[in-house]
Image (cartoon, coloured by chain):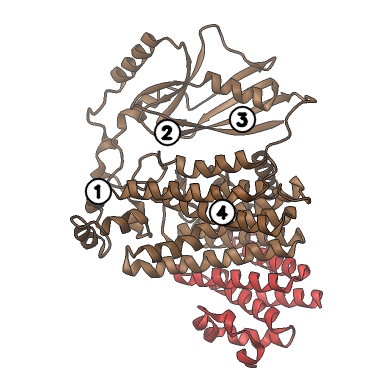
Amino acid sequence: MSVAVDGIDAHLDGLERVWEGGMRDAYGFYRARAVPAVALAAAMVETALDMQTRSGAPPAPPQLLLADLCLARASRLLAETRDQRLQVGFARAVERAASAAAGAAPADPPRALLVAVLAEAA
Amino acid sequence: MIAARRLDLPTTTATEFVDITRRLQDEVTAAGLVAGRVHLQSLHTTLGLTLNENEPLLMRDLQAALERLAPTGTGYEHDDLLRRNGIGADEPRNGHAHCRALFLLPACTVLVEGGRLVLGRWQSVFAVELDGPRQRQLALQLEGEFARRADAPAPSDRDLVELELARQLLVDPAEVALPMRRLVEAGGKRLRPLLSMLSARMGPGRDPLRAAALAAAIELIHHATLVHDDYVDEAATRRGRPTVAAQEGAGSAVAVGVYYFAKATRIIAELGNPDVTFTIADAVEAVCLSQMDDVRLRGSYPGDYAMYLRVIRGKTAALFAASCRAGAQLGGARPDAVERLARFGDLLGIAFQMADDLLDYSDSSGKPRGQDIRQRVVSLPLIYATEDERLGPRVRELLAGPVPEELIQEVQDLVVATGALERVGEEARGLVAAALRELDQVDLDGVRPALTDIALATVDRIR
C-alpha cells in the first residue's frame, strides 16, 4: 500500500504523526474493503475515536484537536464522494461510539461499526 | 402549550428598579397568549424580582430600605477574596447584593387573562439590579391557551431554529443531550443559523423546514466546537454557567462534542444536497486547523496581524461564510449570489471576532475581563497595542510569558491607553460596511433588512 499510488498523501497534511502512530495500519485494513478516499476516511474516524473516547482517560488538549481534525477531514473526504449512505452511516457510527463513551448504551468497537457501514454501503 | 423566551436586560446603575411590565406585555401579545401564566425567573444571584408601585419617590425609598437592610461595604465575609478559592482578581465585592437578594424573589408568576397581564392598578413588575451595571437576562415561560389568528404571522426564522434545536436535543441519549441542552439554552445569538435561514430564502427551492434543519445543525456544530474549546482552554464558565468540562468532566465534554459534531454532519447529509454537505465539511476542517494554529501560535504571543487574520478566518469566519453559502445552496440561489453571500459571511465573521476581542475589556460580556490574556488567545487589541511606539515595548514584555494575575489589569490599561480598542472598533465597523456592500449586487428577495440587522448587531455589542 502506498499513499502516493493511492493519491491520499495530500489529505495527511498535519496528521503525519498520527499516520505513523497507527492510522497507516488502519488504512491498510480498510483499503482491502474500500476505495482509497473511503478507506482513509474510515481510518481517520477509527483513529479519532480511539484517541477521543476509548483510551480510558480523556485525551490531552493537543490530542483532542488532532482527533477533531481527523474527524473533520474524514467528513470532508466523505462529502467529496457525494455518497449519502456512507456519510450517514459513518456519522451514525460516530454517534454510537460517542454516546457509549458518555455512558449511554454500549457500542461495538469503532472498527466493527465502520466495517458494518462499509458492508452495508457496498 | 409553553413558549420560552429570554429577556435581555442591560442595567445602568449599581442598584436599579427596572420596570419590565410593558416588555412582559409585549411578549404576551407577540406570543398570542390569551389565558394562562407568565413565569419569570432571574438567571442571576444578584438580580431579584418584585411587584410594586412605579412611583419615583417610592423607588428611592425602596433603594434606601435595601441599603439599610444590607449596607454596602460593611464587612461581608463574601467580600474577603483572599479566603475564597477559584476567583479572579476582578471578582466583585458584592456581599451586600447577595444579602439584599434575600428580600426579593428569584422567580415569580403573573397571570394572563384576555391577552393582558393581570395586575392591580398600582402594580408593576420590576427586575431589581443589586450589583450593576451589568448585562442581565430573565428566563420567561408563557404557558396556557394561545390565539390561533388567521392573520397570525408565520413563525420567525429564530422560532424555527429554536424549535428544531429543541426537537433534535429531545431525541438524544440523556448522557449527551443534557449537557448540550444546558449550553444551548444558556443563550447565544444564533447568528450562524439565522444567516443560514435568511440565505436559504434566496432561491427557488426555499423550504423553511429544510432550512431550519440545516440551521440547527450548524448551530450544533458551533456548540460542539465550544464544548471542546472550553476543555482545551480550561475555561470554567461560558455564558455565566459552568462549562461542560467543568461540570461533567473532561471525558464527558469530549464525548458530547464528538456526538454533536457527528449528529450535525448526519442531519446535513440527510438533506441530500452534496454541495451543502461539502460546504459545511470544508468549513469544519478549516475550524479544526485554525484551532490547532491558535494553540500553536500561543508560543509567539500575541503574534501579528497576518497571523491573527489567518486564525480568526478559520476559527470564526469559516463557519459564518459556510452558513451563508450552504443556506443559499440549499435554496438553489444563483452561483453569483452564493459567492457574494459567502463573502458577506466571511467579512461579517471577521468583524464579529474583532468585536468579541473588545468584549475582553468590558464587564458586560458574561466572561471575566482579561480572559483572552490569561488564556493567551489571539486578540487584535493586543497586537495593535504592541505596535504603539511608547507603550508597545512594555506590552510585549508583559505578554512574553504567561501573565500573572496581578498584571492582567496593567496589560488592559496599556491597551486602552494606546487607543487600540478604538482602532479595532473602527476596523470591525469598516468590515461590516464592506460586508453589506457585497449584498448590493444581489437580489435579496426581501431579506436585506434582516441581514443588515444581523450585520449591525455583530458590532453593536461594542458601542
Q: Which mark is residue B45?
A: 2
Chain in red on the image? A
Q: Label 2 is found on which chain of the structure? A: B
Q: Is residue B151 visible?
A: yes
Q: Secondary structure at mark 2?
A: loop
Q: Which of the 4 image quadrants contains residue B6?
A: top right
Q: Which residue is mark 4?
A: B345
Q: Which residue is mark 3?
A: B141
Chain B painted colour: brown
Label 3–label 1 contact, CB within 8 A: no
Relative side of B207 to B281, left or right: right
Q: Position of residue B313 (x, y in %)?
A: 49, 61
Q: Label 3 is found on which chain of the structure? A: B
On screen, B392 above or below A6?
A: above
Q: Label 1 is found on which chain of the structure? A: B
Q: Mark 2: few, some, or many residues within 10 Å (few <14, many ≥20)? A: few
How far apart in space, not on screen, are marks 2 and 4 (Cα)? Answer: 37 Å
Do callouts 2 and 1 point to residues on the same chain?
yes
Single out the mark in the foreground, 2 or 3: 3
Q: Which residue is mark 1?
A: B409
Name the N-terminal-most of marks 1 and 4.
Answer: 4
Single out the mark in the foreground, 1 or 4: 4
Q: Is residue B323 visible?
A: no
Q: Secondary structure at mark 1?
A: helix
Relative side of B423 to B288, left or right: left
Query: Which kind of residue does numbered mark 4 sit on?
Result: Gly
Between residues A44 and B341, which one lies in front from this camera angle?
B341
Single out the mark in the foreground, 3 or 4: 4
How far apart in space, not on screen, are marks 3 and 1 (Cα)? Answer: 40 Å
Q: Mark 1: few, some, or many residues within 10 Å (few <14, many ≥20)? A: some
